[in-house]
Amino acid sequence: MDASADPRVAELVARLRDLRLTPRREAGGLGVGQHASRSRGAGLEFSQYRAYEQGDEPRRIDWRLYARSDRFFVRESERESPLTLWLLLDASASMAQADDARPDWRRFDAARTIAAALADHVQRQGDRVGLAVLHDAGLRLVAAGQGPRQRDRIRLALRALQAGGGVPAERQLLPLWERIGPRDMVLLLSDCFDPQLVALVERLARAGRDALVLQLLTVAERDFPFDGGHEFHDPESGQRLLGDGATLRDDYLRRFGDAQQALRSRLAGAGARYACCCLDEPLDRALRRLFDPRALAGGR
Amino acid sequence: MNLVLLAPLGLAALAALLVPLLLHLRRRDERRPVDFAALRWLRQHPRPRFRLRMEEWPLLLLRLLLLALLALWLARPATTAVEASRHWTLLVPGVDPAPLLPPREGEQRRWLAPGFPPLQQAPAPADGHASLPSLLRQLDADLPAGDTVSVFVPARFAADGGLLQLSREVDWRVVRTPAVLPAADPAGPASGPALRLAVRHAGGVPGAHYLHAAAAAWSDEAALPAATGATPPGAAVDDVQSPWPVDAQVRAWLGEGAMPSALQDWVAQGGTALLASGVDLPSTDAVPLVRWQDADGLPLIAELPSGRGRILRFTRGLTAQAMPALLEADFPQHLHEALAPASPAASIADAGAYRPAAGASAFVPPPRDLRPWWALAVAALFLLERWFASARRRGGTA
């Protein structure tokens, strides 16, 4: 999974060049700065002064300027604090699914491409990135770090991955809580069929983390194009179901639509951002939907 | 064009139509395994729907059509051609076509002669076998039922025995012209003058005097014209070498062994020969016909056709011991009846009285068999079906 070896990652990185990963807290529409400031020390890149407005924290007021001009000004930094992005990659068996029309483009391939490209992008932005692979055989963590070496570590970890097995139990997810900082950004790459992962994101969001969910769906799950008799097999639970595609379609689409609606409202209620990406659409478009600040400003 | 089926039981093969229907019926129990992670939103048998579903409608229709054509082929399709009805005007040779009105649209004008030649051609000479009633019956059988016929006949013509009954009404026009009669029979009608018998005998075969006596008896019975030739009727010449009289209708040869070749040639050209029992008959397939039997029913004279003529032979030697009938008083009469040619059945009919009646059962022309063309259509359809089926396979693998 090398950026130079995988043209899909390179292409996605190129397409995401102007994407800004904005934390939700800053995306409320107040500031011009990109990230919320946590450090007030000198040496950080100064951006501008702006007039104090009600609601600004008093400690952000530049008192020296106040002494000179007798007015309150807030000092804003363009980059005051690095962001930490955690990539939670679902590696259960359901992620290994692909469409018949494009059998080599599995859901897991899309997730890996996104993870690798985002790691590259975040590294270029100067932020920190970490990776957690969610698998019932055990959590695999790449601690958050910065710089090109961190990017290569993540690529190395992604290259060896194979999707299979189930989702981790709640107990196995506990180390995540130790690693993910209180104001970190968390992006879950999953099909969101397993309620445990959705519950994890929900709790992370409620606990103050900036949670994002990118749901990856195959075309078959969205459209249910099956016609004729099929034996449907769930790779994760092992269940089998015999049925005629045409007779199952309407009922499936209705129930699946209801489930998607429930998922969206549940995530929205928890304050997590959500976007859905089908395997037949470009990945960057889904990522833009996910990070688009205008959609966020309009949505809240 | 009426389509008929000569073997309707072949339609039972239509049951084969079930085969492609079954082949194309979407198999509901097929199980194509599919990995589907969103299985939890699938519900087993939400609403069972029983609807026949077919795959590949065009190919199915093509196959059904092919099988239907095959079944029809087995049922032997044929057509009975129905042509536009025409009007036929037939003239007996001898009737002058000049006074006729110009022909109408679709009217056919022919001679009532063998082959029914058009009026522009001279009619073929009548050969005696094709009499006018026979030709009319042939025409009636040849023409479709819808055609109408009008016949121009002279007032008198040669007809055969029965009254004519045809399957259709015939417009029977009698034209006042000289009677058209067949040429005089060389043997003459039965009511004509007596036979002339010339007798040659050789090798001491007896019986010549019986024949002489019979011939003499005939000439007494019938009044002969004076100038009949140098040889008196019934003259018998014992000399084998002497030439036969030209006007003798019957030449009797009382000898043994093979017939003289001159006599054979004469018979082949239409003569009648009377042979003694010792003469060998020429080998032929024809079955001898008994012309005269005695009171006990035993044959006395047998007749054998040879060429255009006849050969009659006594079955016994011409002696009173072997054949007592020689001594009977009616021997000349019996001999004359045996020797006289079969009386011609043709007689002169009055055209007005000979108007053909309608009501005979019509001759149904045999239907035209369509199976060769049908087989071509089936073959073409088969090729089309193959092309369709293989095109599907090509498209499937591509």
Image: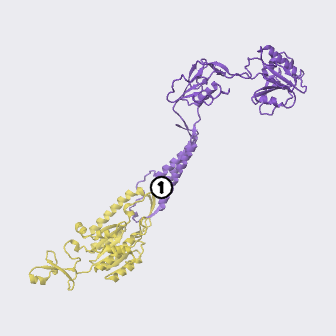
Chain colours: A yellow, B purple
At 40% from the left and 57% from the top, the residue drawn is A248
Q: Quadrant of residue A270?
A: bottom left
- Up-down: is A175 above or below B308? below
**Could you classify mark 1 by the number of other residues whose Cα lies within 10 Å: few (under 14), some (14-19), or many (20 or more)?**
few
Query: Front-most of B275 and A232?
Result: B275
- Up-down: is B156 above or below B67? above
Asked if one can make out residue B226 in the rendered structure from this viewpoint, the answer is yes
Q: Is residue A69 left or right of residue B278?
A: left
Query: Front-most of A36 and B386?
Result: B386
Query: Front-most of B80 and A21?
Result: B80
Tell me residue B272's x, y (percent): 78, 25
Residue pushed farthest left? A70
Q: Quadrant of residue B373?
A: top right
Tell me residue B32's x, y (percent): 47, 61
- Up-down: is A247 above or below B281? below
Label total for image: 1
Residue type at numbered disc 1: Arg
Tell me residue B239's x, y (percent): 87, 25
Tell me residue A47's x, y (percent): 19, 80
Query: Front-most of A64 and A173?
Result: A64
For label 1, the SS is: loop
Which residue bears the numbered disc 1?
B28
